[in-house]
Amino acid sequence: MPSEYGDTTRQRIKFSDDRVCKSHLLNCCPHDVLSGTRMDLGECLKVHDLALRADYEIASKEQDFFFELDAMDHLQSFIADCDRRTEVAKKRLAETQEEISAEVAAKAERVHELNEEIGKLLAKVEQLGAEGNVEESQKVMDEVEKARAKKREAEEVYRNSMPASSFQQQKLRVCEVCSAYLGLHDNDRRLADHFGGKLHLGFIEIREKLEELKRVVAEKQEKRNQERLKRREEREREEREKLRRSRSHSKNPKRSRSREHRRHRSRSMSRERKRRTRSKSREKRHRHRSRSSSRSRSRSHQRSRHSSRDRSRERSKRRSSKERFRDQDLASRDRDRSSRDRSPRDRDRKDKKRSYESANGRSEDRRSSEEREAGEI
């Protein structure tokens, strides 16, 4: 990560930020691949963080961010710059070295090709030996011996095609992969160090990654174009359907109006039926409520009448009994007094009179109570 980006900035940004290197997220940034070689590019100008790469790998499983396009542009720019340096180196060699005929140049090129083949095979042997795969490394060494034999034959053909003085001069060649210089007479160790070195293998990795990104981007663009074309066809189909419907309505306005009229009439009839059913249900409920209320009122009125009659009867009975007891008490007191003051004959007369009056009073009381009860009824 560049020095201008501190820990706080790294914690603040996300992998989708423009300041983050998209090639680093896809593990193909040339600044990382060529680090420690003679073509070390130094620190990248954008943010490199393994935690952001882990976040991107998790999020890319659910959503496509199309970072391959940014990484492809970055690698294309880097490889194009490398290829320009290779062409410049070739022109410089052509100016400094002696000019040879096309036939001799083809023979020298054959020697260079065999040197490159031997170097690659030796690098593979070292890799297999480091992994502990002895049998495979032995098979590759057999191929190396065959390539060495072919190289000796090609060198003999090249030596016989030109003077001895010119053959002894070192003939250089520019590597097409990493733009490094290779000698025609380099030994196997020199070739193995070059073709198995980090610089050459790093450029091979970058070029292979670029080809993979081109393929992925092309597939995604093709898929996106197909989806866009499909959406366009669906829109055109919908527009044609709308146009066809509008034309059919314009050709048959009476039919469309009659359909609308029928729909409107059916809707109005259904609304009218609903209104009628609602009004009928309301009337039924009202009748039921009125009947129930009238029944309850009549019942309550009858109960009140019966209760008032019972209460009046009780009151009249209480009054008649009280008056009867009072009259009897008064009569007994009067008899006692008259018996003390008058003769027995007068007493009899008075007693008869009082009994007659009390009898008349009781009959009048009965009559008055019956009249009151009849009036209350």
Image (cartoon, rainbow, N blue to C red):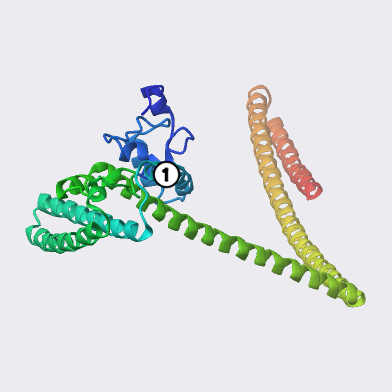
Q: Residue at x 25, y 57 (%)?
A: 111
The residue to which callout 1 is attached is 91
Check the image and name the residue furthest to the right.
254
Q: Across the whole image, how many numbered discs are drawn on residues? A: 1
**Nearest the eye: 154 or 366:** 154
Going 27% across and 36% down the picture, which residue do you hit? 37
The location of residue 199, given as percent across then percent down, is 28, 42
User: Quarter holding the N terminus?
Assistant: top left
Give the quadrant of residue 253.
bottom right
Q: Position of residue 315 (x, y in %)?
A: 68, 40
Three-letter code, disc 1: Lys
Identify whether 341 is placed above or below 37: above
List x then y, in percent, for residue 68.
Answer: 45, 49
Decide if residue 96 is on the left or right side of residue 144: right
Q: Nearer the viewer, residue 364 or 209?
A: 209
Tell me where residue 80 sits by quadrant. top left
Residue closest to the eye, 34 or 322:
34
Q: Is residue 273 visible?
A: no
Query: Does residue 262 appear to the left or right of 178 in the view shown?
Result: right
Q: Secondary structure at mark 1?
A: helix
**Side of 188 relative to 285 (left or right):** left
The image quadrant that residue 262 belongs to is bottom right
Residue 305 in picture, x, y percent from top left: 73, 50
**Front-lying residue, 217 or 356:** 217
Say above or below: 180 vs 212.
above
